[in-house]
Image: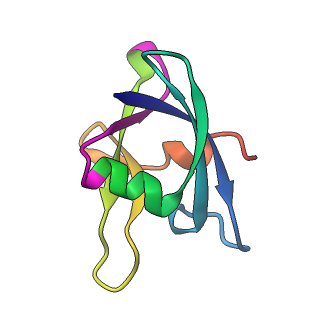
Amino acid sequence: MAVEITHVHVEGTTEDHRHITKYRWVNSSDGKTGTSDKPTMVHWIDVKKGRAYVGAGASTVPVGVIKPDNAAPYLRTYADGRWNNNLLSLPRF
């Protein structure tokens, strides 16, 4: 299963990937929508090998898990050979 992340919820005063706490998504195969918290999405991508992405068509960018040494894992997009900020460009909810 693959989902398109469409919105993010950021908590705190710092607007960075570590402060995204929830994700809204749509299932690309059946159109169902949902909201997942960060630990659930990290586990789904990292352990269950789920696929998430941002964008559509030629602008699709995969989402991966970043595992810093002294912090909780978080999600980030990966495009053009580098980690980037596509998630932070999404609408907030």
Magenta region, residue range: 46-57
How many marks overall? Answer: 0
Which residue appears at 45% of the width and 63% of the height? 39
Q: Residue furthest bottom?
A: 70
Which residue appears at 65% of the width and 64% of the height? 15
Q: Is residue 51 above or below residue 59?
A: below
**In the rendered structure, does residue 49 fall within the stretch colored magenta?**
yes
Residue 72 sits in quarter: bottom left
Which residue appears at 29% of the width and 69% of the height? 67
Residue 27 drawn at (x, y percent): 48, 25
Residue 52 sits in quarter: top left
What colour scheme does the image use?
A: rainbow
Q: Look at the image and tell me in which quarter the N terminus lies.
A: top left
Which residue appears at 48% of the width and 15% of the height? 30
**In the rendered structure, does residue 50 fall within the stretch colored magenta?**
yes
Residue 35 drawn at (x, y percent): 61, 44
Q: Which one is nearer the viewer's eye here, 34 or 58?
A: 34
Q: Is residue 78 above or below residue 29?
A: below
